[in-house]
Amino acid sequence: MIRDITIGQYYDCNSPIHKMDPRTKILWTLFYMMALFMIEGMVSYIAIIILTAVIIKVSNIPLKFMLRGLKPIMVLIIFTALLNLFMTPGEEVLFSKGIFTVTKEGVFLATKMAVRIILLIIGTSILTLTTTPTVLTGGLEVLLSPLKKIGVPVSVFVMMISIALRFIPTLLDETDKIIKAQTSRGADFEHGNPLKRIRAMVPILVPLFVSAFRRADELAVAMECRCYNSEGERTSYRRFCFGRYDLYALIYFVFTSAILIALKVVW
């Protein structure tokens, strides 16, 4: 299960999306997230599914690899769908027994929320899978640079994001090692009732927290030895510039917006 988490990972391959400016991909991701929560109707969802499939195809990332990232949150998706299925009132009742009532509106809302979460995870994963953490934080710092004029510590904020993205794969690998070590000592994480499984997580969480604090202390010492100063003016050897792939993305953005707006107006 730990190996299935794709958040913070970078999939190295040659594709137009990998070559795009990080600022374009960040803005595209924000638009994608807003579009998911604004669209209504089955036709609009089918349209955004097709548009997402096109982006995945262009990114040259295997669909199987992206779907693997849904396994850790499958419980959340199922729980959300069931909650909307049984808790949504409606006029047309499809099934009723005891306290459980399923309506036509509940089925539609449950399906919509499940599809929305799946598309949200897949769409946002494309950003991290096609952009290295260093380039991603660099583009984010450029986008947020106007906030420096009102006293917002953008450099500190971006540094925090960069460190968090950098250590996600590290902590996942550390968790996997701890699980294997505890399993070899006779620990059982797959059998028993939910309470027993939660208790079995204690031998994992304690050494994981100890390891995380140790790594954080080592990182702080390393940054101090390199005279890192959060208040100083930072420079970067990277110079981002918009290319032809970013122009194609802009055209695709306008085309997508026109389709979604038309579908929302018509349907």
Image (cartoon, rainbow, N blue to C red):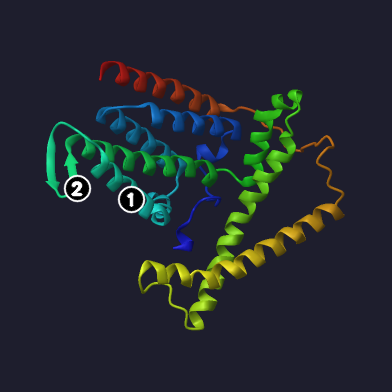
Q: Earlier in the sequence, mark 1 or mark 2?
A: 1
* Residue 76 percent location from the top left of the image: 38, 51
Q: Amino acid at mark 1?
A: Phe
Q: Residues within 10 Å of mark 1 (few under 14, many from 20)?
A: some
Quarter of the image with the N terminus in it: bottom left
Pointer 1 with pointer 2, Cβ within 8 A: no
Q: Which mark is residue 100?
A: 2
Q: Which residue is rendered at x = 45% and y = 67% of the image?
A: 198
Image position of 96 (left or right of 240): left
174 over 112 or under it: above or below: below
Quarter of the image with the C terminus in it: top left
Q: Amino acid at mark 2?
A: Phe
Image position of 134 (left or right of 57): right
Q: Which residue is rendered at x = 53% and y = 24% of the image?
A: 247
Q: Which residue is rendered at x = 32% and y = 17% of the image?
A: 262
What residue is disc 1 on? 79
* Residue 251 percent location from the top left of the image: 46, 22
Of the pair 118 and 214, the residue shown nearer to us: 214
Quadrant position of residue 115 = top left
